[in-house]
Amino acid sequence: MHIIVEGPDKSGKSTLIESMLRLTDEIKCCFRHTKIIHCKIPKTDNPANEYAKMIMKKQNIIFDRCLFGECIYGPLLRDKFTISKFQLKVLMRWLNKNRSIVVYAKTKNIKLNKKRFLESNKEIIDNKSHTKSIYMFDTLFKTHISKLTDNLLYFDAARPNSADSFILGNRFVAMVNSNFFIEQNTIQKKTPGYGNILGKYLIIGESLNKNNTWLGLPFDNGRCSHFLAVALEKAKIYEKDCYFVNADEIKDKYQFSIVHQNPVEFKTIIALGKKAHKIAEKYFESNHIAKLPHPQYVIRFKYKEQNLFINQLENLK
């Protein structure tokens, strides 16, 4: 599992991580044996690949800033979006598979945050850009990230001893205890696909197109993958509720029992394409199965029926 602490400069990220390390004994979690990564300016012109390599490491890591910061500082410092909205969704699916916790550090007292920023001489952005970043972070987390993960916590550093109170709080302790000690190697070997394994929807594709994939994962690149992501968003089926897998990877339903002894009971199985339909019927007969055409078929041959596909998804909620 990873813990990603993100937010504007001087919002208390490093202080919060220091508290995690110091309060290890109190919350009975071995943060001392966890790697700490301080993400800086990307080294290449493809930051999404850099972050993918970091978050796909099979170890427990605490990140002091990560991919979300690049969504803000890319436009601010380099005048371009270096991580697309779709790439962000794909990376979040992997973080959800790892049961990763995202902590948004934000000082509600904006004047206090600006004061801390002006007192520091180490930041690489100016005061005007810093003020803009505060509102950009808010928009990013409220509009997008909150729909991409259930493991999202908000931390306000404005109060005295706020870091210690947050670390010892019931929500953080509960998330850590339920997620931190899940063996990452076991998750990667046993559980196919990616996304929230405790979500409402299991989305089954057909086969991985090895000639058109980004990370070797289901629906991670190409026109049909983008269309599916847009269709789910329009149907208000949020990514945080979905688990994505290809039919070729499913051998039995017990592959989805990594978090519990019994197989996870998804609310709805969304089978995309004929091969997915057969696999869904074979292994998930007791679940509600929605048989839909594969997005590739909709795009190529039934272009006018794309809205119908979205309507079919809406009816599953």
Image (cartoon, helix red, strand yellow):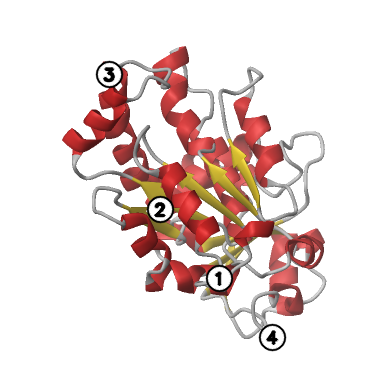
Type of amino acid at the residue the image marks with label 4? Gln
Earlier-in-chain disc, 3 versus 1 = 1
Badge 3 marks a residue whose secondary structure is helix
How many numbered markers are drawn? 4
Q: Are marks 1 and 2 in contact (CB under 8 Å)?
A: no
160 left or right of 210 in image:
left
Q: Residues within 10 Å of mark 3 (few under 14, many from 20)?
A: few
x then y, percent, for residue 46: 64, 23
Q: Nearer the viewer, residue 285 or 151?
A: 151
**Residue at the disc numbered 3:** 127
**Mark 1 or mark 4, earlier in chain:** 1
For the residues labelled 1 and 2, the Cα–Cα distance comes to 33 Å
Q: CA separation, marks 3 and 1?
A: 39 Å
Q: Residue beneath label 1, please?
A: 25
SS under mark 4: loop
Q: Which residue is mark 2?
A: 147
Near mark 2 (Cα within 10 A), the count class, few <14, some 14-19 or many ≥20, is some
**Kind of residue at disc 2:** Lys
Whether residue 194 is visible = no
Which label's residue is closer to the chain start, 3 or 2? Answer: 3
Q: Residues within 10 Å of mark 1 (few under 14, many from 20)?
A: few
Q: Residue at x 51, y 72 (%)?
A: 27
- Look at mark 4 in the image and give the residue it sits on: 261
Q: Is 142 placed above or below 124 here?
A: below
Question: Percent from the top left, x then y, of residue 172?
Answer: 44, 66
State the residue at coordinates (63%, 36%): 51
Kind of residue at badge 1: Asp
- Residue drawn at x 71%, y 36% is 214
